[in-house]
Image (cartoon, coloured by chain):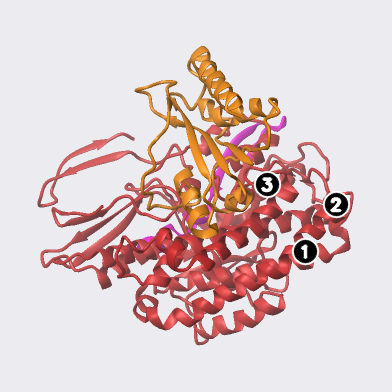
Amino acid sequence: MSNTKDNTIVIDPVTRIEGHAKITIDLDEQNRVDDARIHVTQYRGFEKICEGRPYTEMPAMTARTCGICPVSHLIASSKACDAILAVRPPKGGRNLRRIINLAQIVQSHALNFFHLSSPDFVYGMDADKADRNIFKMMQTHPEMAKEGIKLRAFGQKIIEELGGKRIHPTWIVPGGVSHTITEQMKQNILDQIPEAMAIAQKALRFFKENLPKFEKEIETFGNYDSLFMGLVNKKGNLEHYDGTLRFMDAQGNILEDGIDPRFYKDYIGEAVEEDSFLKSPYFKPLGYSKGMYRVGPLARLNVADACGTPLADRELEEFKALGKGKPVSNSFYYHYARLIEIIYGIERIEELLGEKQTLDENVRAHAGVNRNQGVGCSEAPRGTLFHDYSVDNNGIITGVNLIIATGNNNLAMNAGVKQVAQNFVDGSNVTDGALNRVEAVIRCFDPCLSCSTHALGIVSSRIELRNAKKETIKVIDRR
Amino acid sequence: MQIIIGYGNELRGEDGFGIEVARRLRQSNLRDTKIITPFQLTPELCLELLGAEKITFIDAAYDPYAPYALAVPLPREEQRMSHRLSPHLLMHMLRFLYGSSCRYELFSLCCCDFDAIADDKAYHTALERVVSFITRSN
């Protein structure tokens, strides 16, 4: 819904994303866009809810943050618990965790591309709103819609095979995973790989062939200088489970490398905006908000030297060429990066299943509380995820800090919304196509707002009443 | 074959209604029936529903104005999609993409508490009614 009251356009709710958000666009005297912002209006409070609970409950509890990417939370949470136990899971357990994490990334990326974003690619941003949805896709492109279902089913089936159920599996535990997999389970997954790969490659071809249609969007969809952050492995390659943090600037200079995620607070600050429940993390050495950075598929491919798998590496080379020697800065290419990551995920799952140790009986390390703090970090579909727990000597949680993938992108999403609004929204003639583009730039980041609005305590609750001239007439401060 | 889908979140009080009904129905040895209990409805569920002649959805909906009424919401044109689907959109997918012509029905318990079971007696009466209805019609 939109209206132009008091020179402010409101898009509420934002569609085809997960969670609830509102965008405001402020116009100037000449009806040009002066500013635009995304406001996340959900409020959860997970960090406080968890206090007082035993650390052993944290994977299961924090996974409930989200029904879309619970596996990502299970991974980061279990890794934080590993750190509290001061153990490293056996290779078999680590491999199985890697597989389920990649399966989660494949299924999540598939849903974003095939079912949430494809109407924009197929019909264009200016298509009639009634046509720009999954129903029309089912009528005109049923094969594509079905392929999306199959690819998502591939990822979900792996999660179910390994974790016992598709959503909120409890198989990933502190110290590793609860049990190994059988040869038959392994074979079931391997049997599906050729079809999944064929679908992923076809989707990537489709996307690349259609790129010329979106020249204006490519130019203006969150196309700005920012830093990029992601995990890389020892070789500097793409990494989703372990590794160290790398920060890169818009010119491709590596600002920080090899950072142990345990020390994330030395590099990442978390600002709180008064108009959103989503925190705004930034790169501390550059300060707020100069330290705006992006995470997720685009950032991961930018900071990685290579993927490390043959098909994905071939695609990565083509992708990196878009940046002409610099990181690829346009957020529209998040979709592109997502498709490359799907290919990588499928290749890597096959590789990991081929490793002998993956079927080891020994998949879990056991210990008691050996440390009073533990940080777990992994790459979720939408970006880098941090779980930071403090416990007392009995293992009772005394403090929690979560930095969720979507939250990392908060400043960048706002910058993208403003840029798109300034390029496409004309205050005297607001078209649906223009408003769709404002939403579409958010979909590039594939935000999961349910997941990311977990903060409690320092978020201020401030209500401003403004008149038609946007003069503040009343402020209710609930801090 | 009929497929019964009881879905919801058991950790959220009355939202676990669908799961609980499905669990009870599993003990009833219904003829030619498959029972599934997902957390929520997702697109890939379509693949499990192919071949069904009838699908029964059992869910809970927040409605404090008619607590514990068993409501059957009218199908409506659902344009929105996120990572979870409504029963209507799922059926739409089955029809458009896979040519399914199966019938479906939806039992939705009007709930007033997603933190606990507010009225144990009323909740279980509704549960028995759904179980009994489905069992008798099998």
Q: Look at chain A in the picture and name its colour.
A: red
Element at badge 2?
Answer: loop
- Label of residue A182 in the image: 2
Which residue type does callout 3 highlight?
Ala
Which residue type does callout 1 highlight?
Leu
Q: Is residue A216 left or right of residue A468?
A: right
Q: Which chain is orange?
A: B
- Identify the residue shown where x is 82% and y is 51%: A181
Q: Residues within 10 Å of mark 3 (few under 14, many from 20)?
A: many
Disc 3 target residue: A80
Give yes or no for residue A395 being in the magenta stretch: yes
Kindly tell me whether residue A267 is visible in this rendering: no
Chain to which mark 1 belongs: A
For marks 3 and 2, give the CA distance: 27 Å
Question: Who is closer to the viewer here, B101 or B7?
Answer: B101
Asked if A99 appears above or below A51 in the picture, the reply is below
Q: Is the same chain shared between marks 3 and 1?
A: yes
Question: Who is closer to the viewer here, B19 or B133?
Answer: B133
Q: Is residue A453 left or right of residue A178?
A: left
Kindly tell me whether residue A31 is visible in this rendering: yes
Q: Choose the circle earlier in sequence order: 3 or 1.
A: 3
Chain to which mark 3 belongs: A
Asked if B9 appears above or below A337 in the picture, the reply is above
Which residue type does callout 2 highlight?
Thr
- Identify the residue shown where x is 83% and y is 41%: A366
Residue range in magenta is: A390-414
Chain to which mark 2 belongs: A
Disc 1 target residue: A190
